Amino acid sequence: MDSYEEVDWDDEDLMIVDDDQYDGGDFDDSEDWGEDDFTGLESGGSKSISDYSEMVLNKHTEDAIALAQESGFACGSCFATPSELIVTVGVSVSALEDDLLAGCGLDDAKLVFIRLKFAGTPLKLLFAPPSSIHKTIEIRQTSDTDFNKTKFEDEAEFGLWWTLQERLTDWFKLHWNQISERGERLEKSLQQWASEANLEAVESILETLELKESSRLLVKAALAISGNDQASAIDLVLSPTPAVNDLVNEFRMDHVVPERDPYLVDVALFILDSIKDAPKKCIVCGVTQPLPLLKPVACSQPLCNFQQIDLGLGVSLDAELRHRPSVVDLLISLTYAATSRGDRLVPFPVLEASKFDKKSFTSTKIKIEDGDMAAVRKLLDKCPAVKKLSVWANKNTLRDECDTISILLYPLLRWIVATNKSHLKTLQQNLPITPKHQFVLKSTPPEKEMKFQVLKEKHGSFFAWHGSPIANWHAILRTGLKNMSGTKGQAHGQAYGPGIYLAKDSQTSLGYSRNASGPRWKHSIYNSNFNCIVLCEVINMGSDSKCIGGVHRPKCSHNKSAPYYRIEAEDCIVTRFYFVVEGQSFNTQATELGKKVNKHPEFLRMSRASK
């Protein structure tokens, strides 16, 4: 068989079928293949090579299913015909982090399950190059833990369905040789059994004497020496002669015992690992992201960004509206505010859709051109309040309702939610300060968080406030808190040097958040003059007399007039809590609030998760 490098898998090799294309054959009605099915395969047997190869194929698959079940994975029964093989395997996602599940659109899922469907003759399925096999790989989610009752056609796609199908296709390219070789070994072994002895007689003696499978070689040897006389063979089995024992050893040396094929276990583990590693790669093209992220998103390529929205990959807009409506409202509001300046709406939503006219039977392309801020604002002005969007999401009519307003509205809302690379979550137990809208804000990739925790164990940490105009937060949530000094993203001066500026008290940071604020979305649940500040955790390097690691303190020794913290090293700062301040002033010292934060269950959970 050709090596996988020489096999050309084109787009036709992976076909995603519509639900009505599959007749829904009952997996439970499939046949179980036992040793009796190999009767007649011995020399002069009546079964054809097609029958025989079909048995090999089914034995191969049933062994793979049994091994997967023993490894803790859910499996449906094998459904096989002379020209088709269908097998399903399910992977539990209950042990994965809630933030990762939300980023993959798996909020309500208990299982991700994979249906593999191969079409062709049994011999082709086992031994042919993969390019000659018509195959379908379908991946869905389900909240039903009883896998055997789950109907594949009734289950929903999710944010990684296309990504995982593409990556699993590549996995099969790489591993098909191994699967075929194991099938060939099984075929050789079963053929050897068939040619060496009368299998009916072997089965009869095993059953009569109630012997275990391990006695099969002894029975075969006894039959061979007795000339297939069952009565004499039984005597030899009960009292083996040296000749019988010698023949058993000879059989044992010649017989190839095939290992059970673990390919379904490998598929399940591959899917589970791919979900865990999804934030590290582009959700479309698979290229490694410059930095591992918190959730799977597209890379910076415009085509990948377009395909992410077009294919519905990543976060589920409907699920976000059902579970986190206040977060969706905030994201829309921040995007709207970012339209005040071209360099604030980064990345920019370049969207395109076709509108079909039923009367004229013509299609018209409608799109938002790159940099057209007015078009984004105009579209969001038409968007109803999140409360109504949530009602539509709960009725499963969100896309249809949005399309009646504009066919670009749903793609734009999906883009706003899906391109947010941070985790924003409403705080269930508010901190004791004035703002009532409080959120957890995680914008740090796992690797950076782990590095931060190592530094924290060595140096300790403290808390400080950071404020920025509302128009900046759209970009900050997608890139993280960055040292923008000397770049076009710099919002304020750097009178005391480059770095991220923070304050001891909230009032100072609020002053910076109110400076040059952008336009406000009129349907937001937050009032028309809200601003945002964030509480950050900073590595406690150095002291007032000595600055270390790019962490500068107020009135430090080399700049006694500086009233702020100035952090040059991005690895020394992480965001923790985000506050929407609706016009009211409040002045809270970060050090005092930090005492409450250190005991807060959400902060403790974040610290444990990173270790």
Image (cartoon, rainbow, N blue to C red):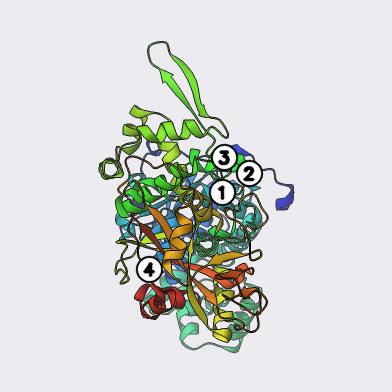
Label 2: few (<14), some or many (≥20) within 10 Å?
A: few
Disc nearer the start of the sequence (4/1): 1
- Residue at 58% x, 58% y is 43
Disc nearer the start of the sequence (2/3): 2
Secondary structure found at label 1: loop
- Residue at 69% x, 43% y is 8
Structural distance between the alpha carbons of marks 2 and 3: 19 Å
Q: Pointer 2 and pointer 1: residues touching (CB < 8 Å)?
A: yes
Q: Amino acid at mark 4?
A: Asn
Structural distance between the alpha carbons of marks 3 and 4: 33 Å
Residue 298 is labelled as: 1
Q: Give the residue pinned by disc 2.
A: 301
Closer to the camera in the image, 484 or 601? 484
Q: Give the residue pinned by disc 4.
A: 587
Q: Amino acid at mark 1?
A: Ala
Disc nearer the start of the sequence (4/2): 2
Residue 306 is labelled as: none
Q: Is residue 119 above or below residue 250?
A: above
Residue 342 is labelled as: 3
Q: Amino acid at mark 3?
A: Gly
Foreground label between 1 and 3: 3
Q: Is residue 363 left or right of residue 496?
A: left
Structural distance between the alpha carbons of marks 4 and 2: 43 Å
Disc nearer the start of the sequence (3/4): 3
Secondary structure found at label 4: loop
